[in-house]
Amino acid sequence: MNKNSKTNYKANILVVDDTPDNLRLLVGMLTENGYKVRPVMDGELALTGAKAMLPDLILLDINMPTMNGYEVCKKLKESELTREVPVIFLSALDEALDKVKAFQVGGIDYVTKPFQVEEILARVETHLAIRQLQKNLTTKNQELELTVQQLQNTQEQLIQSEKMAALGQLVAGIAHEINTPLGAIRSSVENIADFLKENLLQFPDFFHSLSPEHQQYFLDILQRSSEQTTSLSSKEKRQFKKVLIQELETEEISNADTIADTLVDLGIYDRISAFIPLLKSENGSLILEKAYQVASIQKSTDTIKTATEKAAKVVFALKNYARYDHSGEKVRSQITEGIETVLTLYNNQLKHGIEVTRDYQANLPSLLCYPDELNQVWTNLIHNAIQAMDYKGHLSVSVTHQSDSLVVSITDDGKGIPPEVMPRIFEPFFTTKPPGEGSGLGLDIVKKIIQKHNGKICVESIPGKTTFTVALPFDSNHKTNS
């Protein structure tokens, strides 16, 4: 939406209607509800006004002199500048062919005159919300594409490093971590689109056909559903459904199984006595189903929000990990942020069998360091721990402030390091892994990075418990041996 620090309105709406009374009504109603409204009375002015100041949404009459609404909408959609602006038609024309033509020329919705104020506001808010979701999704996709492009541009120079070798091993897991939320977004958008296509035009007629009492039941169901914020497990759903079926059958309500299933999906699984009269009525099942369809739109928007946040988190971690500071200067950084970046990238390997315990001391000070290089330390140590546990077990990461250093300990409950191998683990090219699974440079690189920070690294290992401990001094000018 066109909203900045100098404006406090919800959105900028262009209203096009050659009837002054309609314009006054729409301007007053929308202005009262926090929108900036620009009224015009003919098609030519509408096209000029839309290009001069791009609106967030257009309410467009059809029957106008000189240029009708269909022609205006067609020209808007032909222009690269205005083609993405949603257009809602307002017209006294109520024939199916009129509505079909409105959608054919690019309209996103159709409201028949005389209209209800509440209906106009609901349509406006819905389409502005959908438009904002589309913009957010486009932005996230562009960020993903940019990130992928950045990785491609730097791949040639980074491919020889151990850091990119580790990233190469993680690609499949990272792709899964991004594709999963993108799939959820795609499914949710399709759900919203299907509802708009199949139900939106009939919905006002359906709602107005209900008695006032049934309208209130309908709104009460939506209210109860919106209050449900807890996600139920499959087992919990089955348990609640079983109890509901018994309650409905006691009330001699037919289709108890289907109704119970719908109620649980709506998040209504207790205190249903208030809805019993509705469910016993002739239209009860239909009203419940329509309420479920509307509630699913809200659930879809919630899913999109959660999924974009998850994808953004992975992208942010990927960008942080792939970044390399060529300035050669130390910067102040929170060590735990780098560790969390690495854990995020390894999430696909961790979530299927490894329990991760974090023990970060509160109010840890920042450290003057090379954070991109330290990320390689955490990558190697966490990767080795995962492999040592054969991808099943308990990984513990602790960060504490001890004297003049930050101390990071990474512990796994894997098979341990054999005593005869222990003296050689930091030697370059030494590895116990099968060919193709390790270069033997990982711990050598770790040791060199820690030395560059004037820090120390040590390891203690017995079968069932291996701990690598890294101490990084705050006073980096104080030289210590590893």
Image: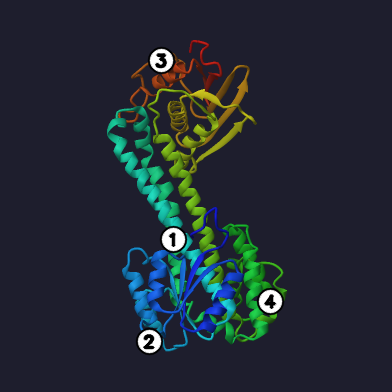
In this orientation, does residue 34 appear?
yes
Amino acid type, mark 2: Leu
Q: Is residue 332 left or right of residue 54?
A: right
Distance (Cα) linking label 4 and label 2: 39 Å
* Residue shown at 45% from the left, 44% from the top: 314
Give the spatial CA distance, label 4 vs label 3: 72 Å
Q: Mark 1 highlights which residue?
A: 134
Q: The residue under label 1 is which amino acid type?
A: Gln
Residue 150 in the image: above or below residue 475: below
Foreground label between 3 and 1? 1
Is label 2 in a helix, a strand or a loop? helix
Q: Which residue is mark 3?
A: 424
The correct choice, above or below, for 71 with respect to 462 in the image is below
Indicate the position of residue 300 as horizontal and vertical percent values.
Answer: 51, 63
User: Which x, y percent locates residue 163?
Assistant: 37, 30
Disc 4 residue crowd, few under 14, some 14–19, many 20+, Cα 10 Å: some
Q: Residue at x 39, y 78 (%)?
A: 43
Front label number (4 vs 3): 4
Per the image, the residue denoted by label 2 is: 97
* Count of marks overlaid on the render: 4
Instruction: State which quadrant residue 162 falls in.
Output: top left
Q: Which residue is mark 4?
A: 275
Provide the secondary structure element on which disc 3 rests.
helix
- Residue kind at label 3, given as amino acid type: Arg
Q: Residues within 10 Å of mark 2 (few under 14, many from 20)?
A: few
Secondary structure under tag 1 reads helix
Q: CA distance from mark 2 to mark 1?
A: 28 Å
Q: Is residue 307 left or right of residue 171?
A: right
